[in-house]
Image: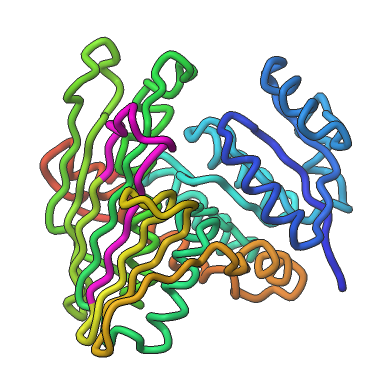
Amino acid sequence: MRTLDFAVIGINHDHINGQIGALRRAGANCVGFQAPEDDLAAAFAAKYPEIPRVAEAARLYEDPSIQLIVSAAIPADRAAIAIAAMRHGKDVMLDKPGMTSLAQLLEIKAVQAETKRIVSIMYSEHFEVAATVKAGELVAAGAIGDVVNLIGMGPHRLRKPQRPGWFFERERYGGILTDIASHQCEQFLFFADAVDAEILSASVDNRANPDKPGLQDVGDMHLRTPKGVTGYIGVHWFTPDGLPTWGDGRLTIVGTHGTIELRKYLDVAGRPGKDHLFLVDREGMQHIDCSTVELPYGGQLIADVLNRTETAMPQARCFKAMEIALKAQHLAETGKLPSEYSQEAA
């Protein structure tokens, strides 16, 4: 089986571990990493002693043997890394959010169209969650009929004392809808089988962290596809201390013949483990343990890089999820949608 060599540029978010893991499970080789922060680099090297650190990103961009650049840099810096990688003939896997402004998205899309490289954003609440993968299989098989409504909830634990300074700077993390809710935007498009969505409403606020005025600790949006599928997305940084994990992430999918509820990271009703799926249809109710479901994203992305295909995620959906999140962020902060999807809209 053919595989590929990849390199890491930017390790500011722990999601880099999931990104590396997805590719390595599918047989890819990480041949180097670059990070300017010595403390982060030391921790990374301790975890991955076999991956050499390089001083300059240029060495990785210019290495012809490296086919894919992977990044979990500070969110505002990811677009520039992606553009540099594509300009050097490499494909890209970014942590979400892939960019923090509509202007960055516009530039990435232009360079991607010009270079024909792959830009993949790892929306981990889909691609790294077995229950979400299983729900996709069930919906595609018609288990609940036609999807009519989705509710996506993305609570997170703040861990304020442990967060770096950029985490609280609006221009660097992009706002709560750009950051967290991009996960749910991608899932909404995926399960609704939609290529676009209208943003009916959006809001953000800082309700409990006045000492961090740049932080938005709560946000939501309401969406509708051209075919009438509606969705509500709610995200916040208020996971209670008593919860034994970082967030009680849930997704409810309503169809014409049934419903699916995902309890992704734990079941508050007491079932052990994670990846719980509850299916209610015309035959009754059932709980499905999805913990052994295969996660195909890493292998699919490797195949896409090697074969120039789009099996892991259509490029259009990758970009559209970020476009919706960024537009909703703009609406929430200004009270109006961007008049055009353009440089001025940012």
Q: Is residue 60 magenta?
A: no
Q: Position of residue 164 (x, y in %)?
A: 49, 18
Residue occupying the point 58% across, 69% down: 293
Given residues 199 and 164, the one toward you in this image is 164
Vertical order, 76 against 250 (above or below): above
Magenta span: chief secondary structure: loop
Q: Name the foreground residue: 304 vs 238.
A: 238
Q: Colour mode?
A: rainbow
The reply, left or right, for residue 80 in relation to residue 288 is right
- Up the image or down, 77 lies above or below 261; here it is above
Q: Position of residue 336 (x, y in %)?
A: 13, 46
Relative side of 288 to 213, left or right = right
Establish if 210 lies above or below 170: above
Q: Residue at x 52, y 63 (%)?
A: 130
Task: Locate residue 268, reporting x and y percent.
Answer: 32, 48
Residue under the image location 80 percent in, 57 percent down:
28
Q: Nearer the viewer, residue 6 or 115?
A: 6
- Looking at this rendering, what residue extends furthest in the top direction? 211
Q: Is residue 238 magenta?
A: yes
Q: Which residues are magenta?
A: 235-254
